[in-house]
Image: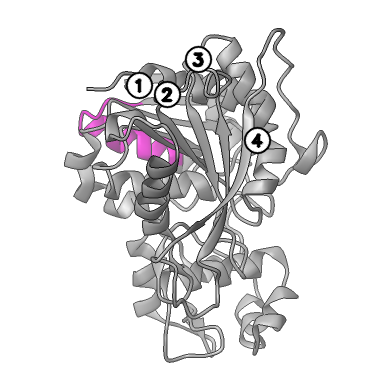
Amino acid sequence: MKREGWNEEVEHQSRASPGLDQGGLRGGARAFGRARGGGPGGHQGAPVVAGAKPVTLQRIKVHSSAIEGNLEGETADRDVLVFLPPGYASHPKRRYPVVYALHGYSIGAEQWSGEIHASQTIAGAFAKGAGEVIVVLPDSKTVHNGSMYSSSQTTGDFETFVSRDLVAYVDQHYRTLARRESRGLVGHSMGGYGASRIGMRHADVFGALYMMSPCCLSPRDPAQAPPGAAAALAEVKTLQDATKLPWGLRAQLATAAAWSPNPQKPPLYLDLPVENGVTRPDVVAKWAANAPLAFIDQYVGALKRYKGIAIDVGDRDGLKEDAAKLHAVMDRYGLANSFEIYPGDHTSDVPTRFQDHVLPFFSRNLAFEAR
């Protein structure tokens, strides 16, 4: 299988990469979409492509019955950004493939759109030859800053929101090619985790899959959390208390809300892996069960349905080793996939990669014609 950019120097650099943060989510405090320097959120924008025709941005709300009634009070009316290609208005009979793009932890769709300069990069990709598609960015930020794109009574079922409710809405309200072969799924960081999770479990909905620097691929040992983390979390008595926590501890609450919900434990309605100084094996097992490297073997048949699967990660990203393991598992099963390690950290050149790698990948791997 294609494996680009791999060399001994990259291997050596990985030994110095960031490790585990308090939330069991590797990659450090910027692991889910924030960086320093350059543009909104720190991402350097891709160079403007000469002659690029503008895309049309529509801001909409999509109601999700899958999120109704959650215990955290997350709204079921989700903000969604829809980017229509230049030819959409001028070709009223034409139908388009759709690429669903999932944001990372601690940000929402609006901020991620700004960070990747979405209007510019999408238009630039089309101008450079990628086939025109509709690009959809759903917002999955929660009270603890991220849904993990999972299914939980505490947060709501964000997995079904993306794979069923959002897809159904877009197919009903826009001129799409409404079949799996014409739908792509991509995400960065927590969104990369979401793309892996939803992609494995819903191959009947999507036809091509791209994971950008995916987080949370392997089970985590709660004993590796920094000293004092469990005690600090134990002091949280209200949702307002939770909002005052540092980034890493909020990430742990997001993980627990998604993967170890407890409807009998207000006000947070979750169980943590360490309680009263004692590790809870039942909670650790629940978290491990949500790691794609733990459950991928169950979905090999589903993954074989994809025309294209891609994974990329920076050579200075603490998530690199797990991404390589995911690629290795796919190779072991003979699953067609590409894997690229590029120069950079977790948030390096994400706009350029979206323009020059992600959208061209979907241009090659999605069906642009009706049956």
Other-residue count near label 2 (Cα within 10 Å), few / some / many at <14 / 14–19 / ≥20: many
| Chain-order first, disc 2 or disc 4 | 4
The amino acid type of the residue labelled 2 equals Phe
Residue drawn where x is 57% and y is 46% of the image: 103
In the rendered view, tell whether residue 31 sits above or below residue 221.
Answer: above
The amino acid type of the residue labelled 1 equals Asn
Q: Real-space Cα distance between discs 1 and 4?
A: 27 Å
Side (left or right) of 69 relative to 15: left
In the picture of the structure, the residue carrying the numbered disc 4 is: 345
Residue 365 numbered tag = 1
Which range of residues does the magenta coloring cover? 323-337
In the picture of the structure, the residue carrying the numbered disc 3 is: 130
Q: Real-space Cα distance between discs 3 and 1?
A: 11 Å
The answer to whether the residue labelled 1 contacts the one labelled 2, judged by CB atoms less than 8 Å apart, is: yes
Name the element at disc 4. loop
| Rendered location of residue 10, percent (x, y) | 56, 27
Q: Is residue 344 magenta?
A: no
Question: 296 or 113: nearer the eye?
Answer: 113
Residue drawn where x is 48% and y is 18% of the image: 91
The answer to whether the residue labelled 3 contacts the one labelled 1, judged by CB atoms less than 8 Å apart, is: no
The answer to whether the residue labelled 3 contacts the one labelled 2, judged by CB atoms less than 8 Å apart, is: yes
Name the element at disc 1. helix
If the image is split into quadrants, where does the C terminus sit? top left
The amino acid type of the residue labelled 4 equals Asp
Residue 362 numbered tag = 2
The amino acid type of the residue labelled 3 equals Ala
